[in-house]
Image: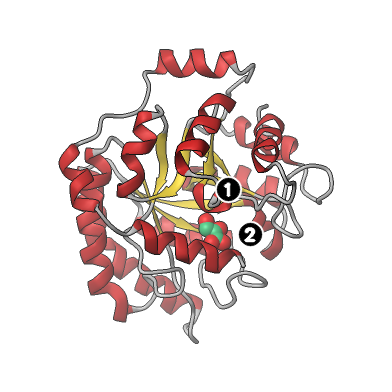
Amino acid sequence: MATWNRRAALQGLLTSAATVGALGLASACSPAEEKQSTEAMGLKDNLKQAVCRWCFQDVPLEKLCAAAKEMGLRGIDLVGPKDWPTLQRHGLESSMCNGAEINLTDGFNDPRFHAQLQKQYAAMIPQVAQAGYRNLICFSGSRRGLSDAAGLENCARGLEPLLKLAAQHKVVLVMELLNSKIDHKDYQCDRTSWGVALAKKMGSENFKLLYDIYHMQINEGDVIRTLTEYHPYIAHYHTAGVPGRHEIGDAQELNYPAIMRAIKATGFQGYVAQEFMPQQTDKLASLRQAVQLCDV
Ligand SMILES: O=C(O)C(=O)CO
């Protein structure tokens, strides 16, 4: 199951942070090189695209990076410091860094986890910056009976001390919106309005939302209107087909080209990362099709 795979992947990535921090990796390609590479792929490249590592876990990272680069992708999501040098060698960005979170259920909404989270994020933020990256994922955690108001207040208290450090390092803490109906039962940041209320309360360019199109279609629908209204609070997007979380073509209910056009119309400069579990035998062919579908 996806959650399990992702957790296992995260465990494997929570190491070697200090080594990479010490390396002080430079950022990926120059804008001119990027443009050449995406033009060579025949992409319009109006939206920067990436792919989530955990969906392609059985493809070795070197191979995934080479394929991603060749498809015109700009980054790989949800990799931690130990894999940054590999991405770097391929001229790819770590478009959504991870490795500071505990997990998806023990998050900022519960004061019991604040000390540990603050320690881990305070250590990771400078490393993300030193490597030349920007986005660092975070999670609300499960409700465990908390009201929306109490969960929001707790998140704000837990995040607040980190945002100054994030601002100093030009890093954005990005909280993911996940569905609480199927994949992450009891997750608190499960509606855009709640995430936006938290972002408004934080009032910082260093705290934003990851709008996962798959998860939000399941919990609330109304995708295009929602992202159009709340785009100033959204730093990043994830994709997948609904239902099933597989390929994003016409066998599922979301109209991805229309959604991508709506994202483009907001002037979005961040990343759209493919986060579906391929069903076709040739997984990289599925990825290529998704990239082309989202290239608007
Ligand atoms: O774990 C999940 O379901 C996610 O969407 C992570 O990005």
Asked if one can make out residue 232 in the rendered structure from this viewpoint, the answer is: yes
> Label 2 neighbourhood size at 10 Å, few (<14), some (14-19), many (20+)?
many
What quarter of the picture does the C terminus occupy? Answer: top right
Q: Is residue 16 above or below residue 191?
A: above
Asked if one can make out residue 177 in the rendered structure from this viewpoint, the answer is: no
Identity, as a three-letter code, of the amino acid under mark 2: His
Quadrant of the rendered image holding ligand 1: bottom right
Task: Judge from the rendering whether residue 180 lies leftward or rightward of residue 87; answer left or right.
Answer: right
Whether label 1 touches label 2, CB < 8 Å: yes
Q: Is residue 35 above or below residue 94?
A: above
Picture quadrant where residue 243 is located: bottom right
Residue 81 placement (x, y as % from top left): 30, 48
Residue 118 placement (x, y as % from top left): 24, 65
Element carrying mark 2: helix
Residue 132 placement (x, y as % from top left): 28, 35
Q: Which residue is mark 2?
A: 215
Whether disc 1's CB lies below 8 Å from ligand 1 is answered yes
Picture quadrant where residue 286 is located: top right
Gap between marks 1 and 2 measured at Cα: 9 Å
Earlier in the chain: of badge 1 and badge 2, it is 2
Task: Judge from the rendering whether residue 45 lies leftward or rightward of residue 142; answer left or right.
Answer: right
Instruction: Identify the residue shown where x is 39% and y is 27%.
Output: 91
Residue at the far bottom: name it.
145
Instruction: Identify the residue shown where x is 67% and y is 43%.
Output: 283
Identity, as a three-letter code, of the amino acid under mark 1: His
> Label 1 neighbourhood size at 10 Å, few (<14), some (14-19), many (20+)?
many
Q: Where residue 282 is drawn, which disc sits there?
A: none
Q: Is residue 97 above or below residue 263?
A: below
Whether disc 2's CB lies below 8 Å from ligand 1 is answered yes
Between 162 and 14, the one lying in front of the other is 14
Between 77 and 259, the one lying in front of the other is 77
Q: Which residue is mark 1?
A: 238
